[in-house]
Image (cartoon, rainbow, N blue to C red):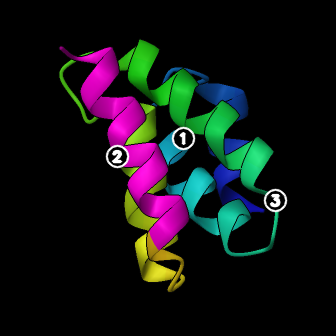
């Protein structure tokens, strides 16, 4: 996977970490997606919180209830 080789060279590449999270989420690996999003949030604290991104992924996948849970967690984290 191209993203993995890019991250091997630059493990704090927030954009690549977010792209990887998106890819693995839609491959049915949400725990791995969250881990990548958390790493992206650490690499770029000005970006969306990992929880907010997970909410968006869930919405895209049609799981609005799960997305709302993640959105609530993001709001709580940033309150």
Determine whether the residue tagged by mark 3 lies in a helix, strand or loop. Answer: loop
Mark 3 or mark 1: whose residue is earlier in sequence:
1
Residue 72 can be seen in this image: yes
Q: Nearer the viewer, mark 3 or mark 2?
A: 2
Q: Does the stretch in magenta take in 73?
A: yes
74 left or right of 27 in image: left
Pointer 1 local density, CA inside 10 Å: few below 14, some 14–19, many at least 20: many
Location of residue 23 (image quadrant): bottom right
Mark 2–mark 1 distance (CA, rounded to whole Å) = 20 Å
In the rendered image, the residue lying farthest to the bottom is 62
Pointer 2 local density, CA inside 10 Å: few below 14, some 14–19, many at least 20: many
Mark 2 or mark 1: whose residue is earlier in sequence:
1
Where does the N terminus fall, quadrant-wise?
A: bottom right
Location of residue 32 (image quadrant): top right
Which residues, given as a range, are shown in magenta? 65-79
2 and 1 marks in contact (CB < 8 Å)? no
Nearest the eye: 54 or 1: 54
Q: Which mark is residue 29?
A: 3
């Amino acid at each position: 996977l191209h993203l993995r080789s890019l991250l091997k060279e630059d493990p704090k590449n927030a954009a690549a970490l977010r792209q990887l999270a998106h890819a693995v989420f839609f491959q049915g690996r949400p725990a791995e997606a969250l881990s990548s999003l958390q790493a992206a949030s650490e690499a770029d604290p000005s970006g969306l919180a990992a929880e907010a991104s997970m909410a968006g992924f869930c919405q895209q996948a049609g799981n609005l209830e799960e997305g709302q849970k993640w959105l609530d967690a993001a709001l709580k984290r940033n309150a």
